[in-house]
Image (spheres, grey):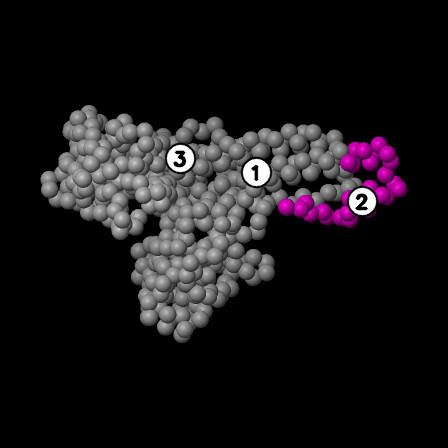
Amino acid sequence: MPLRRTRGSLAAECARPAWSTACGRRARLAVLCCLCLGALLLARPEEASGQPSGVGSPPQVMLNSKEQAYLRENPSVPLCVDPDWPPFERINEQGQHEGIAADLLALVSVRTGLRFELLHTATWEESLEAAATGRCKVLSFLNVSPKREQWLLFTEPLLNDPNVFITREEHPYIADPAGLDRETIAVPVGSSVEELLRRSYPNLTVVTTQTEDEALALVSERKADMTMRSLIVAASTIRKQGLFNLKIAGQIPDYGNRLRMGVVKDEPVLRAILDKGVATITPRERDQSVARHTAINVQMGVDYSLVAKVALAALAALAVALYWTLRLRSLNRELKRLSETDLLTGLYNRSLLDARLREEFERARRYNRPLSLVMLDIDRFKAINDEFGHLMGDKMLQAIAARARASLRATDILGRWGGEEFLVLCPETVAKDAHAVAERIRAAVAEGEYPSGRTHSVSAGVASMAAQDSVDTLLQRADTALYQAKNSGRDQVCGDEA
């Protein structure tokens, strides 16, 4: 990425006769150090190209006759977006839609043949109003809510993004926000996050702000203990604004953004076409877009009237650059861990499980090797929450997850699939051996001692990959076997055995 200059070229400036030899040496030293600073901050391989790599020539989706007719009758559909929500999306100075949402919608457009026609709006509220009055048919990137479901259809998620706690770096990790005592959290007024915190965590003192950036500033300036923000937006803001006294300190389990396209309710065929396009987007393509739009963009100019002063501070600037680089690496490691881990149980999360499942499925199919799945579900978990409360339910999830993990072989991959469900990937494993894995987990859970003071159990479903299986059908067969175990009395293993 080239460094922008605010004045003439370096050669022209240094050629001026007013510069003494000593001053020229100081100028060159200052420029060299500034270049080092820029290189350290900008050296990120994913920024080498203006577009996410690896997209290639995507396959076209298969449309039925009704969907094909829709495309012929509607070669383009009006699209409304949030004009100021970086890095997710914005309308730039040239009037173009850019950001993560724009990248993903471009993939959908190419793979379905549907062209989006951007309707320019000044605010998100104006975009919502335009969709409600029929001026546009599609909204680009939003969460489902009961109010929106009254007038919108929603596609499958384009992107899943957890909300995370942001604190100063000396604050301890937040495993359970219900255990915090009278700490303050700054959030934008009227947001869904504010509603959630006031309802579920009365132990926290909520301080409201007008914007998310103001909330981050209160934390950075020690006027609040924490804030809550989208993981992707938090990473981008911390990097771009240099708020390296802040860190990501935890998240509320199962509370995050599942960002979808919204389609006006009288367009079910359009929603079906968009869903087919969304289904083609791979985890790698999503990751590349996120990496592209959360990278640091630094523009540096050289004011040669101040070069002598800059030279005196150049070494200090270089030291700061080195420190920032180390902090960025630490943040990236934390972001990677959060993106792969279920924070409540410490197991892999669904996103990582889904990616690993598809990798193992393709490997097994390519080399004609066995692959089995074990789907687990805690029996009567709702009764635990109803009788003991959700905090006890969380402790039970942690305890049962620990016993399940201790029962696995080194090659097995265990993660939380959602709620009280867990999934075990068993590479190089035939049905009989996967059934033994499931039985070992079932017995370990049944023999455990738990915070509730009672015994508890799990049911399990086993499915082994067959020649006709896809990833989805393999998962469906494991899920069906799990329900068979539930309906047969619980605390047992059902499904493929030979």
The residue drawn where x is 74% and y is 30% is: 312
Mark number for residue 242? 1
Q: Which residue corresponds to mark 3?
A: 250
Q: Which residues are magenta?
A: 1-28
The residue drawn where x is 49% and y is 41% is: 235
Mark number for residue 11? 2
The residue drawn where x is 25% and y is 31% is: 404
The residue at the far right in this view is 17
Q: Residues within 10 Å of mark 2 (few under 14, many from 20)?
A: few
Q: Secondary structure at mark 1?
A: loop
Q: Earlier in the sequence, mark 3 or mark 1?
A: 1
Compute the Cα span from label 2 to label 3.
50 Å
Compute the Cα span from label 3 to label 1.
20 Å
Q: Are marks 2 and 3 in contact (CB under 8 Å)?
A: no
Measuring from the top left, give residue 299's x and y in whole percent. 65, 45
Q: Amino acid at mark 3?
A: Gly
Q: Determine whether 358 is above or below 169 in the image.
A: below
Q: Amino acid at mark 1?
A: Gly
Q: Amino acid at mark 2?
A: Ala
Q: Determine whether 90 is above or below 205 in the image.
A: below
Measuring from the top left, give residue 79's x and y in whole percent. 45, 64
The quarter of the picture where residue 225 lies is top left
Residue 24 shown in magenta: yes
